[in-house]
Structure formats: C-alpha cells, structure tokens
Image: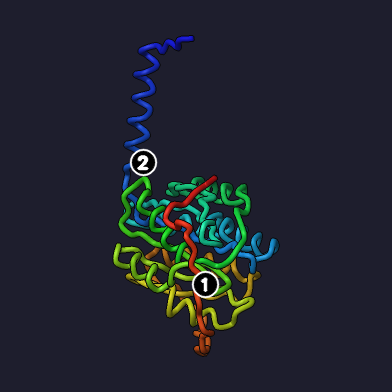
Amino acid sequence: MRRFIQPGLVLLAALLLAGRAAAVAQPVDLALVMAVDVSESVDAGEYLLQHDGIARAFEDPELAAAIAAGRRGAIEVAVLEWSDRDKQVVTVDWTRVDDAASAAAFAAKVRQSQRSSNGLTAIGDALLAARVLLDGAPAPADRRLVDLSGDGIANIGPPVREARDALIAAGITINGLAILASEPWLESYYDEYVIGGAGAFLLRAEDFSSFATAMRNKLLGEIAGLMPAAAPRAERRPLPQIQYVLSGANPLKPTDE
C-alpha cells in the first residue's frame, strides 16, 4: 500500500521543524544535569524526598526569578538517575526553563517520573554519563554543570577522581550535595573525590528530610553562579579504605529505556 503525502503538508512540516530548530538553538546561561542517587541504600521514602525536593525547588518563585535575572534569562536542565555501572537513566530529558510556567512544567515532569533502578554506587559512571548528556544538550550554554547528590561513597566502577578530572578538563563543573544519613564521612569524600571545576562547591544535608532546603539553596547558587551560604563545615573525618569493583559495562551512554 502506497502512502501519498500532500506537498502542502511537507512544507508545513518543514517550517515547523525549522522553527523548532531555531528555538532550540537559542543559547542559555546554564546547562545543568541533576544526577540523583537511586542506589540500594536509598529506600522508597528517601527517594520520594529527593524527588519532591527537586520539584519543590523548581516551583519556588525565587528560583524562576534567579533564572530570569541571568544574562540570557534561561537555563536547560535534565535529570539523570544513577546507581550501578549499567544503570544511568535519563528520567527527565532536556527542558528549557525561562519563566515560572516552564519551571513548574519541569517540576511536573519530575513528579511524574518513576524510579529507574537500584543497585551499587557507581559515581564515576554517573559522572561520565552526565558528560555525554551535556555533550548532547540542545542549546549552547555559557556554563555546563553537573549537580550530583547521593548518600554513599562509590563501591563499583572507574575511580571517581579520574572521571571527575575528565569532566573538569572538558570545562564542566561538578557540585555536590552529600546526604549524611548513613555515612557521616561522606562530606569529606565528596570534597576530595567528587566536586571540581570553576566555582565548584559542596553542600550537605544531614538527612533526607532536609534535602529539599539544601537542594533549593544549591540551585539558587548554581543559577546565579555564586557559592551559596553554607552551614559550617563538619570536622574532616578519615575516609574508609576505598575499593572499586570494575565490570565490563559501558558507562558512557545514558538510556531512557
């Protein structure tokens, strides 16, 4: 059976695609990947607190005002959930946020998404996947940033410091939000192994119940390009001996399957 396409429809489709491409090409102040820990140490209730914390931050009028105050008045943001080596999943794809309505629409996408996995804690793979996601961002950005939150140290995958340094060399900044619910030394670990790049900073949440406030403060600082006011740094704790279990999984391509 043959399909016949009217020339007028072809022209209309071409115009729509051209208009969409032009809109996508508009540069933004910031391309932001929110890399969220969904490893097995994060239970269902804790996952919902993270989920809700991100959505609430984007529903805050102060966040929309901070975006509007930027030179270009827009950011693009995506959510990447991560756990084991082969489990880096884009749960909310790239979304342009340039006003309160688009910020609320992004928050709604976050609320509608479902937990993608659980498994071991492959921070190095998460960082590498975030870089691939940033490289495929739809609009050019003045700054590129990974916002990585989690509640544990890496226990599988490539060494985190090597992955971090690769992102820094590509001009990407990594900020951290260490959730200290189960590993009180995690702040020191993130400080030494995870964060880096121009203007990098680290915030901590004492537990998952304080995640929403910490995430809001962190996003406001990231959007403004400034380090937010933080609680006094905890006394530096000795880090446990770190061992990585490597596997043959390819960490470089995020998937939404």
Q: Earlier in the sequence, mark 2 or mark 1?
A: 2
Indicate the position of residue 219 as horizontal and vertical percent values.
47, 63
Indicate the position of residue 208 as horizontal and vertical percent values.
63, 70
Residue in view at x 34 percent, y 55 percent: 29
Q: Label 2: how many residues lie within 10 Å, few (<14), some (14-19) or many (20+)?
A: some
SS class, disc 2: helix
Task: Residue under label 1, please give it.
Answer: 154
Numbered label attached to residue 24: 2
Looking at the image, which is closer to me, 141 or 137?
A: 137
What type is the residue that disc 1 sits on? Answer: Ala
Q: Which image quadrant: the C terminus?
A: top right
Residue in view at x 45 percent, y 58 percent: 251
Numbered label attached to residue 69: none
What type is the residue that disc 2 sits on? Answer: Val
The color scheme shown is rainbow
Circles 2 and 1: CB distance less than 8 Å? no
Indicate the position of residue 173 as horizontal and vertical percent values.
36, 66
